[in-house]
Amino acid sequence: MTGIITYSRNVSIPVTTICRNRCGYCSFSREPGSAATPLLPPEEIERLLRLGAEAACTEALFITGERADDVSPAVCDRLSAWGYRNMVEYLVAMGNTALQYGLLPHTNAGVLSQTELSALRSVNASMGLMLESSSERLCRDGGPHAGSPGKRPAARLHCIEQAGELNIPFTTGILVGIGETPGERIDALSHIARLHHKYGHIQEVIIQPFCPKPNTPMSSNPAPPIAAVLDTIAHARLILGPGMNIQAPPNLVQSHELCLRAGANDWGGLSPFTLDTINPDNHWPGLPVLEDSTRAAGATLCERLPVYPEFVTDHYLPRRVREVAANLMDNNGYARKNRRHG
C-alpha cells in the first residue's frame, strides 16, 4: 500500500447502450432496435459536460456499447443525420467538446482498430478496455462470454497492445466471479503485466467483482466472496509490481480498508451527480466514507486526473490535451484544488 490513495471526479456519459456482445452479466447493453434512444444526441452530451464543468469534474467518461454502428441501422441513421460517418468520428467530436469545457476525456468503446485508437488519441487523456478474462473457456456455449465476439481474449489483448504501440495511457482490468478459476485470474494479470512491460502504457488495473443484476442470465449467480477479491488484489500487486495503480471500485467492494491493505491504491472515478453507468444500483460511497477508510489504512486520499501524473508528458499526450491537463493539475500532477474552468 502506498501513502497516497487516489480517485478522480468524473461525469459519466453513456453515449449508446447498443452493443454487439451478449454477456451473461451485463444490464447496460441493449440489442439493436431495443433502445428508444439509440444514441445520446450532441446537445444532451454537451448538457452533461456543462454540468460536469460546473461541478469541478476533471474527467468526461465516455462509455459506449461495442460496435454499435456495425450492428444498429438506427445508430447509423442518427450519426448520418448529425453529419458523422461512424461512431469514432462522433466520439472524437464529443471529445473536442469536452476539452472546450476544460474536461479531460476518457473513452471506453470496446475493441477498436489501431486506426480508430489513433483517431481517439487526439482528444483523449486516457482510454480503457477491460480484459475481463484471458479464459477462452468462458467464451464457449453456456459461458458468460458466449455470443460475445468482442470478449475473446485475443481480440482484447490485441487492442490493448495496439494502444501501447500508440503510447495511449490505458486502463484495463479483470472481473472476479464470472466463472473463472483463481489460476485464470493470475493468467489474465500476467498477460497485462507482459504488455505493460513491453510498452509501459498501462496506467491502472481494475479488480472488479461480479455483481448479479436482475433480468440477466447470471442474475441468480452469487457475487464473489470478499476473500476472493482481496486475494486477487494481492496477486495483482505482486504480479504488476509496486509502481502499478490498482483500483478497487468502492461501490462494488466491501471492506474498503482491507482492499487498501491488500494492495489497492485507487478508488476510480466518482461522480457528484451521475450514476455508475455499468452498475447503476451500486451507488458511490461519499468522500467522507473513503477518507475514513483511507485514513484507517494509514494513507491520505488525493484527487487525481483521469490520466495519472507520470503520463502527463509529450510522449503520451497530444499538445491540446496536455494543455487542458496542465490547467487542472497541481505541481505534483494531481488535481488542483480550487480550480475553475476558464
Image: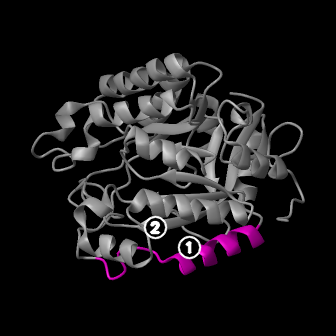
Name the foreground residue: 107 vs 323: 323
- Residue 212 sits inside the magenta stretch: no
Q: Is residue 93 left or right of residue 342?
A: left
Please state the horizontal and vertical placement of residue 172, each as a whole percent of the image: 48, 38
Q: Quadrant of residue 98?
A: bottom right
Q: How many dots with numbers?
A: 2
In the rendered image, the vertical position of residue 168 relative to residue 81, given as above or below: above
Alpha-carbon span between mark 1 and mark 2: 8 Å
Query: Which color mode does the image show?
Result: one colour
- Residue 52 sits inside the magenta stretch: yes
Q: Is residue 134 left or right of residue 169?
A: left
Question: Decide: marks 1, 2 in contact (CB < 8 A)?
Answer: yes
**Magenta stretch in the rendered image:** 35-55
Please state the horizontal and vertical placement of residue 175, each as a whole percent of the image: 38, 41
Amino acid, disc 2: Val
Q: Residues within 10 Å of mark 1 (few under 14, many from 20)?
A: many
Amino acid, disc 1: Ile
Assign the N terminus to one quadrant of the image: top right
Mark 2: secondary structure: strand
- The residue that mark 1 highlights is 45
In the rendered image, the vertical position of residue 222 relative to residue 46, given as above or below: above
